[in-house]
Image (cartoon, rainbow, N blue to C red):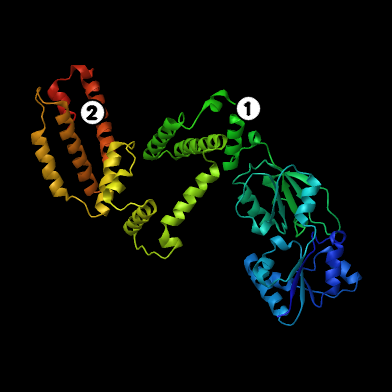
């Protein structure tokens, strides 16, 4: 196979073709332009440089993916015959070049269309460039430059993606198609991106969305939250936020987790999003403090959890095989024991934090024991529970420690019965509490005051 040289035409306008690109096109044995519809084609004719194009593939292909595939096939076929120069606007973002990158011997750089549009706006800070057909994940960080908006349809697709993070009234600097020179941009609203005249769209059409201050945005992402936290913790920031430490925030994290769980139980999804935001704030807050004190940073958090998910999912990222969820759980526990060097069941059980809610802790202890083969049948648990109920010391002379011991074992067995019958003890107790509240409300509505209820009546409301 002959060599493949990729040449950057930049905007494709005649004045923007670099001397290096022109020299490479003169020296090339066979020159292929992505499209003849550019000012560079007129320059090549005037210089007497022969060239072919891939314009016929635009009609043949059903979408951009197929266009890039067919184009790559054509270039490779030509390279079988000898040296080929393939001239595109922006090699770094060209879909065809990505498909043949392993076969490319040399790239001649140029001034990209995106850089020309961005330079005309003179944005501050980072600029992110996308070919319109490649726009996928959208972020509102920095300035966004969108190139090669070659149709109203493509402009509409981009608008819908951009609307995920930008408000529809966001100002956009719109550069209409012009093969002779870079036109002066029009400032339009994002909602009008696909409402321009058809002649304004083409491979040289571009759009730039300048970066906004975080306080001016209507949609915010993770980076915005980090920036706000940086401001609050900085000198001159919020006094309360600046006073917080890892330990002072501990209880807030627990409270936010419980409030999130309550919102999920209520299926109030807007409220769930709000509460999850509070949980995320605690993570970012802790990371910010960690960076200041040298304990850890956000990168340590994301690295730790990403590495853990890869290690613990060997059935996805390694050679393990798991046919169902139960097998995955057992595999997870096995890998965890290996990582921590646990050789006994008791080590695994003691690894559970004692600060967990105790019903949850009992459930998890039993699950771990069951996966290790140390489970108790539900029948045996019920027999033990009945025995303990008969032995429960309620007389005045009974010791407190003895009562605590018996009641504790009864609660543990109740958790086991719940788990063995497929329900969660914490949820069961929550339902029982809510039932008690409703029954008391009913009693108050009937009797006027809960204090007026007899002992038998109160007992009735517990059934």
Query: Mark 1 — residue?
Result: 235
- Residue occupying the point 40% across, 34% down: 254
Image spot of residue 106 (x, y percent): 75, 69
Image spot of residue 251 (x, y percent): 42, 30
Specify whether residue 61 is in view: no
Disc 1/disc 2 C-alpha distance (Å): 54 Å
Q: Is 331 or 70 nearer to us in this picture?
A: 331
Query: Seen from this angle, which residue lies furthest bottom?
Result: 81
Image spot of residue 377 (x, y percent): 17, 51
Q: Which quarter of the rendered picture does the C terminus lie within?
A: top left
403 above or below 340? above
Residue 367 lies left or right of residue 341; in this view the side is left
Q: Is 372 or 259 nearer to us in this picture?
A: 372
Q: Is 446 or 436 nearer to us in this picture?
A: 436
Q: Nearer the N terminus, badge 1 or badge 2? A: 1
Quarter location, residue 11? bottom right
397 above or below 368? above
Q: Residues within 10 Å of mark 2 (few under 14, many from 20)?
A: some
Residue 337 lies left or right of residue 51; in this view the side is left
Q: Residues within 10 Å of mark 1 (few under 14, many from 20)?
A: few
21 above or below 167? below
Residue 454 lies left or right of residue 153; in this view the side is left
Could you tell me which secondary element the residue under label 1 belongs to? loop
Query: Mark 2 — residue?
Result: 439
- Residue 87 image label: none
Specify whether residue 302 is in view: yes
Q: Which quarter of the rendered picture does the N terminus lie within?
A: bottom right
- Residue occupying the point 17% across, 49% down: 378
- Residue occupying the point 66% across, 59% down: 133
Could you tell me which secondary element the residue under label 2 belongs to? helix
- Residue occupying the point 71% across, 61% down: 92
């Amino acid at each position: 196979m002959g060599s493949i040289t990729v040449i950057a035409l930049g905007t494709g306008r005649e004045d923007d073709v670099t001397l290096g690109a022109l020299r490479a096109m003169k020296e090339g044995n066979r020159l292929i332009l992505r499209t003849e519809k550019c000012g560079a084609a007129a320059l090549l004719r005037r210089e007497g440089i022969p060239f072919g194009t891939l314009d016929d593939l635009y009609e043949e292909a059903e979408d951009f993916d197929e266009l890039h595939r067919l184009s790559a096939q054509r270039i490779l076929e030509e390279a079988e015959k000898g040296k080929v120069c393939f001239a595109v606007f922006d090699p770094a973002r060209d879909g065809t070049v990505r498909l043949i990158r392993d076969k490319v011997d040399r790239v001649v750089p140029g001034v990209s269309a995106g850089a020309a549009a961005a330079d005309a706006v003179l944005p501050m800070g980072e600029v992110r460039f996308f070919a319109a057909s490649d726009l996928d994940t959208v972020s509102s960080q920095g300035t966004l430059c969108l190139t090669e908006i070659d149709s109203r349809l493509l402009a509409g697709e981009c608008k819908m993606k951009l609307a995920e993070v930008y408000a529809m009234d966001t100002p956009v600097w719109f550069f209409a198609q012009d093969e002779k020179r870079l036109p002066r941009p029009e400032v339009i609203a994002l909602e009008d991106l696909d409402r321009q005249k058809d002649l304004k769209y083409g491979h040289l059409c571009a759009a730039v969305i300048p970066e906004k201050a975080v306080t001016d945005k209507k949609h915010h992402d993770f980076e915005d939250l980090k920036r706000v936290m940086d401001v609050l913790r900085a000198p001159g920031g919020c006094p309360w936020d600046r006073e917080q430490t890892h330990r002072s925030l501990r209880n807030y994290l627990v409270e936010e987790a419980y409030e999130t769980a309550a919102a999920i139980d209520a299926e109030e999804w807007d409220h769930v999003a709000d509460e999850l935001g509070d949980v995320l704030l605690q993570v970012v807050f802790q990371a910010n403090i960690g960076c200041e004190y040298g304990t850890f940073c956000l990168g340590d958090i994301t690295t730790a959890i990403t590495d853990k998910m890869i290690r613990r999912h060997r059935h996805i990222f390694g050679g393990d095989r798991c046919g169902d969820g139960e097998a995955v759980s057992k595999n997870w526990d096995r890998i965890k024991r290996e990582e921590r060097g646990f050789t006994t069941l008791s080590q695994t059980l003691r690894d559970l934090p004692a600060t967990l809610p105790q019903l949850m802790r009992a459930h998890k202890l039993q699950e771990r024991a069951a996966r290790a083969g140390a489970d108790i049948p539900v029948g045996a648990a019920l027999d033990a529970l009945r025995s303990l109920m008969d032995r429960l010391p309620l007389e005045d002379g009974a010791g407190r420690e003895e009562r605590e011991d018996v009641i504790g074992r009864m609660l543990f067995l109740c958790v086991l019965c719940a788990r063995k019958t497929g329900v969660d003890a914490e949820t069961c107790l929550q339902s029982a509490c809510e039932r008690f509240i409703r029954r008391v409300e009913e009693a108050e509505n009937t009797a006027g005051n809960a204090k007026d209820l007899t002992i038998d009546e109160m007992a009735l409301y517990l059934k």
